[in-house]
Image (cartoon, rainbow, N blue to C red):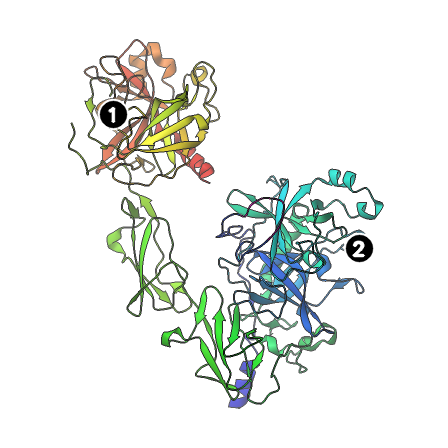
């Protein structure tokens, strides 16, 4: 009985499958790759691992060759769904798809041949295949040439294997630009396939242009309603069919089309994804609801029994319904060298991608899982990215076949913990008492200590949580890493040894590190036009009127502006020790801002800098009061700094500061009725005292209030009455917080 029970467990996986986790249709990390962008010159180039992490090879078992043959390309769109062309999986004679057991999908593969071992390649069985019900191949001119493959298990995502984005909505602009990118093994234009993966940049033309360019009746019928026309002047091969054509939008790549039938060397009709969003969304949802085997094995058609892959089509019916041995859907299992030799050992499959290297050999040293080695031969296991050998002693990855058994253990890959990388977080890692590099994958038992950079703090009370995390068995870290936010609104404590605004005091050098100078290029020279306040590494808050030419009402071009942080001197060309300059990428103002026409309502602007500022004691952001930290009361005073006109009616060379009281908007309107039209609902007033107040040149600077040692910006210097030095009108930042945060989100990338 014990023997029978053990035998049963070896053949069968979990008796009941499980439904797949309902993944987001547009996977959250889709379309990102950890490689520099390739150039966009037209043509084909040799690819590198990770350049197209969503590209897969689709292999079909050939009963006559008794091996798997590379037939098509495909694209990963979720952890368990691959898109390809319907013709790749369609049996024309029977007008139906081939059985899923004929196919294997391989991600992270660089070599063309199935038999070539790739340590980072992930090979997965296909559970089910869906194509449009009306697809008829050549009979319907390859219209609706799209197929979705539901895999037996999820991919393990890493730098070399990732999904591309696809967007199930028509609200997005999906008109492709003139260049689309793809990958394959037949793109180089020679008669024979490439042994290593190629990538190509191909030009797109519209269907109308395509029909004018290729007028032969032989070709026109293939340029149908659901196609894009991609030029392939160097030709392509049949096994490029099914590969995805992608396009970068923002910081992500999106699937735009699928290479369709290879009908002409000059152009390739390609299935337009936007035409099939509804079908694709329904299909992926159906796949997500289907059962699967926990270990990625074969699910019998009765939906209750799982088999390990090696027991499918082995001549014995293990499924109660016999679905594992249906003759017309069983490719013969591939057995390799020494499978019948006495004492041979089979190289085991792993949860990860894997290959094996035979040691002390001369030829055919690289081997795949499922092959056999002779007794007394030694192999080294090559676990894929994110995995490592399970052996403890020195992480030894060598294993000996000893008369049909493994010494001293069966080769096994275990999941490692991912590298520790997070913005503004520093790490120190150790394993078994030795320091190791935190940028690599790490073994269970690794202990990592972390802390935020100087001038940053974690999003929790540091005293309430230990800053240590441990790599657990299974490849996860014990603690969730904090997000480090910049410390805001802190007065510079480093240098306070040195004692403009009219009748104001000089600031201490670098005392208010959020204040920046804004310069406009006129007559090939940068002149100071306004101040601003740094609110993040890339955004500066200022006044909208600073960004418009008063004579033409035209917005200044970003390329004519510069900003300088860490400055005390007004002159751009007086270079200072802590000065950091940046060009401006975007000038952002409210859509409804109209200057004088609307009495300077919504007088607020954001500058998105080209440079990402590095924070230090002399360059830090001011706080935005999103939670109402500042409690306003009568006679509360705010801090204003700037380089405006002094009491001598000249611009101050040095940054000056003044503390002034504010006045509620209703009281201000009653007191200054001749200026009431400019005291709009999004403003408040600041009263000048002892002839001290804001002047020309101070515009755009911030008014801050200190609470608990931190300064919060509540006002932006806007306008004042020309012939009066009694008061100034400030834009109320609180009224525009939603606009600020929405704009920052939009322009961050």
Tell me if I can see residue 56 in this picture.
yes
Residue 692 falls in image quadrant: top left
Residue assigned mark 1: 655
Residue named by callout 2: 138
Name the magenta segment's main secondary structure.
loop
Which residue is outermost to the front?
362
Please state the horizontal and vertical placement of residue 145, each as a whole percent of the image.
72, 53
Q: Is residue 154 above or below residue 688?
A: below
Image-quadrant location for residue 472? bottom left
Residue 600 left/right relative to 703: right
Residue 449 at x, y percent in the picture: 29, 59
Q: In this view, does 110 lie to the left or right of 461?
A: right
Give the CA separation, mark 2 to mark 1: 76 Å
Q: What element carries label 1?
A: loop
**Vertical order, 160 against 726 (above or below):** below
Which is nearer the N-term, disc 2 or disc 1? 2
Q: Residue furthest right?
A: 217
Q: Is residue 43 magenta?
A: yes
The residue shown at (22%, 36%) is 492
Q: Indicate the position of residue 517 as horizontal and vertical percent values.
A: 33, 27
Percent from the top left, x then y, of residue 459?
A: 32, 48
Image: magenta residue range: 38-45
Q: What is the crowding at mark 2: few (fewer than 14 residues within 10 Å), some, or many (at least 20)?
A: some
Q: Which of 298 and 554 is in front in this view?
A: 554
Residue in the picture at 71% in, 76% down: 326
Q: How many labels does the image show?
A: 2
Residue mark closest to the camera, 2 vs 1: 1
Camera sees residue 589: no
Under circle 2, the secondary element is: helix
């Amino acid at each position: 009985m014990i023997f029978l029970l053990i035998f049963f467990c070896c053949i069968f996986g979990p008796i009941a499958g499980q439904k797949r986790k309902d993944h987001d249709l547009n996977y959250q990390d889709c379309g990102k790759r950890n490689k520099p962008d390739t150039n966009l010159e037209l043509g084909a180039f040799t690819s590198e691992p990770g350049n197209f992490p969503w590209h897969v090879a689709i292999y079909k078992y050939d009963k006559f060759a008794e091996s798997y043959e590379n037939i098509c390309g495909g694209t990963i769109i979720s952890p368990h769904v691959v898109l390809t062309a319907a013709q790749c999986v369609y049996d024309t004679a029977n007008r139906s798809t081939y059985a899923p057991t004929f196919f294997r999908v391989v991600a992270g593969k660089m070599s063309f041949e199935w038999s070539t071992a790739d340590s980072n390649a992930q090979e997965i069985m296909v559970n089910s295949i869906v194509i449009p019900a009306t697809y008829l191949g050549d009979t319907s001119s390859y219209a609706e040439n799209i197929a979705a493959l539901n895999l037996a298990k999820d991919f393990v995502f890493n730098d070399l294997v990732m999904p591309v984005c696809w967007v199930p909505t028509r609200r997005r602009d999906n008109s492709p630009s003139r260049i689309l990118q793809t990958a394959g093994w037949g793109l180089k234009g020679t008669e024979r396939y490439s042994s290593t993966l190629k990538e190509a940049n191909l030009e797109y033309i519209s269907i109308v242009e395509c029909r004018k360019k290729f007028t032969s009746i032989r070709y026109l019928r293939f340029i149908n309603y659901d196609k894009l026309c991609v030029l392939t002047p160097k030709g392509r091969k049949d096994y490029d069919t099914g590969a995805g054509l992608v396009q970068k939008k923002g910081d992500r790549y999106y699937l735009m089309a699928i290479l369709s039938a290879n009908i002409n060397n000059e152009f390739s009709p390609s299935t337009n994804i936007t035409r099939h969003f509804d079908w694709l969304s329904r299909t992926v949802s159906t796949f997500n609801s289907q059962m699967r085997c926990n270990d990625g094995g074969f699910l019998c058609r009765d939906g209750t029994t799982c088999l390990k892959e090696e027991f499918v089509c082995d001549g014995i019916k293990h499924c109660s319904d016999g679905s594992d041995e249906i003759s017309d859907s069983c490719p013969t299992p591939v057995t390799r060298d020494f499978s019948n030799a006495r004492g041979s050992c089979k190289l085991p499959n792993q949860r990860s991608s894997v290959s094996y290297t035979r040691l002390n050999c001369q030829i055919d040293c690289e081997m795949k899982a499922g092959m056999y080695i002779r007794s007394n031969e030694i192999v080294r296991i090559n676990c894929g990215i994110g995995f490592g050998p399970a052996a403890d002693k020195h992480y030894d990855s060598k294993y000996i076949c000893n008369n049909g058994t493994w010494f001293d253990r069966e080769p096994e890959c275990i999941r490692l913990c991912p590298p520790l990388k997070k913005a503004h977080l520093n790490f120190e890692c150790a394993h078994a008492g030795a320091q190791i590099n935190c940028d690599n994958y790490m073994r269970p038992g690794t202990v990592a200590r972390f802390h935020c950079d100087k001038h940053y703090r974690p999003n929790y009370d540091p005293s309430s949580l230990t800053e240590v995390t441990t790599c657990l068995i299974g490849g996860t870290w014990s603690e969730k890493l904090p997000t480090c936010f910049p410390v805001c609104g802190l007065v510079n404590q480093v240098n306070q040894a040195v004692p403009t605004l009219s009748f104001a005091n000089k600031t201490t050098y670098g005392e208010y590190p959020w204040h920046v100078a804004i310069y406009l290029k006129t007559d090939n020279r940068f002149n100071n036009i306004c101040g601003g306040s740094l609110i993040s590494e890339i955004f500066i808050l200022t006044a909208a009127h600073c960004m418009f030419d008063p004579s033409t009402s035209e917005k200044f071009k970003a390329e004519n502006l510069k900003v300088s942080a860490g400055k005390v001197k007004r002159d751009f060309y007086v270079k200072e020790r802590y000065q950091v300059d940046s060009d401006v990428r975007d000038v952002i103002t409210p859509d409804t801002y109209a200057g004088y026409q609307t009495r300077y309502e919504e007088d607020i602007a954001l500058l998105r800098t080209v440079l990402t500022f590095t924070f230090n004691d002399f360059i830090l952001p001011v706080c935005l009061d999103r939670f109402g930290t500042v409690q306003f009361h009568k006679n509360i005073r705010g801090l204003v700094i700037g380089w405006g006109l002094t009491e001598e009616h000249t611009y101050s060379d040095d940054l000056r500061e003044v503390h002034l009281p504010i006045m509620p908007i209703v009281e201000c309107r009653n007191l200054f009725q001749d200026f009431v039209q400019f005291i709009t609902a999004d403003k408040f007033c600041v009263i000048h005292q002892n002839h001290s107040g804001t002047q020309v040149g101070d515009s755009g600077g911030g008014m801050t209030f200190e609470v608990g040692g931190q300064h919060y910006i509540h006002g932006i210097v806007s306008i004042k009455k020309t012939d009066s030095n009694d008061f100034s009108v400030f834009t109320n930042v609180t009224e525009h917080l939603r606009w600020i945060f929405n704009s920052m989100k939009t322009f961050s990338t």
